[in-house]
Image: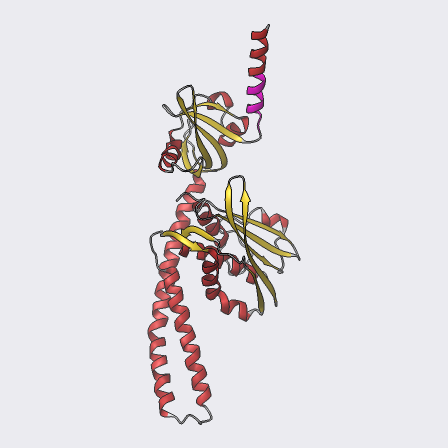
Amino acid sequence: MGRGRRVNQLEWYRFLLEQAAQAWLLLRVEDWRVVEASEAAARMLGLPLEQLRSLPLPGFRRLYKLLQQKTSESHIRAEAVLSLPDGRTHVVQAQARLASFRGTGYLWILLLGTEQEQGLVERLVLTDKLALLGQLLVGVAHEIRNPLAAIQLNLHVVKSAIPEDAAWSSSVEMALQGAQRIAELIETTLNFARPAPQVVQRHDVHEILEAALKLIQMLLYRKSVTLRRYYATEPLPVYGDARQLQQVFVNLLTNAADAIEEQGSITLSTTHEELDSGRYVVVSIADDGVGIPPEDLAHIFEPFFTRKPHGTGLGLAIARRILLQHRGELLIESRPGHGTQCIVRLPAAGEAGW
């Protein structure tokens, strides 16, 4: 009687786990075979649950190696490329942790999202296009810088040749200031676009934000946008590549400014949060612009999706990818006519496990 009750309980608990809303897998480390899984995982991978069980998925070996390298981390979040029996390839975002039961090692996987091979190809094409755009940007900036240097030199010659009290002396001075401003913007653009390997260091997020604001200050001025800062009083350190994180904030701030048709305001605030998974630095960028229609909100992270007349639709896709690489996330809330709020959450320094 007792044995029958235990069998029924095991069947009941297995049923509950299979029906869980989360897409989860349990792999045996010695052969990378799935020993248990949920119906949600089977649906996400497009396989029958019985076929998924016992299926070898060595594509998760990468997550296992990352966990071994990061001994201080109980779990990690990364991409894995899975080859499925019917020839399909899936790229999945997964959260993984190690487990051991009666001397056998297991890898517990929570699937966070999946993309088919077409998505992988699109990202490769996108990478090539971005590389080409970067090269073109550097080339154009160099072509402007050379004649600009000649213009500055000649303006200095004109300035030195005329009396300081001449009627058009102030006009020459204004032209010199404008040329100098263009030169500074070109140099900043070159530094921003110049390819460089990822350099992960400890940074105060406020310093990265201020560097991003310098890049778009002319845009804010031209559109009569008021910027309000509500920074945390203490430094908010994060580990990451300053250039890449700066690119994230430039994209988000530019979008916020573009959403304001004539004049308005952008509110930039920073704080920290204590969550079950650790301590996070949070940056909020809120505008009072036109907002995003609900039918568009579901597609804003898709590459090349844009409603801007001259937009590329790449900014948010790039920003989200960079933040995922930094173990962060990007949340966007918006209502038409009430503006948009972008929330960036990054692991605080000491929590990222770099």
The range drawn in magenta is 11-20
Image quadrant of residue 341?
Answer: bottom right
Quadrant housing the N terminus: top right
What residue occupies the far right of the structure in this picture? 337
Q: In this orientation, does residue 40 appear?
A: yes
Quadrant housing the C terminus: top left
The image shows residue 197 at horizontal and vertical percentages of: 33, 52
In the displayed structure image, the side of residue 354 where residue 261 appears, left or right: right
Asked if residue 314 is positioned above or below residue 104 in the image, the reply reads below
Image quadrant of residue 15?
Answer: top right
In the displayed structure image, the side of residue 338 where residue 312 appears, left or right: left
SS assignment for the magenta stretch, majority: helix
In the displayed structure image, the side of residue 204 where residue 30 appears, left or right: left
The image shows residue 139 at horizontal and vertical percentages of: 34, 64
Is 19 a magenta residue? yes
Is 264 a magenta residue? no
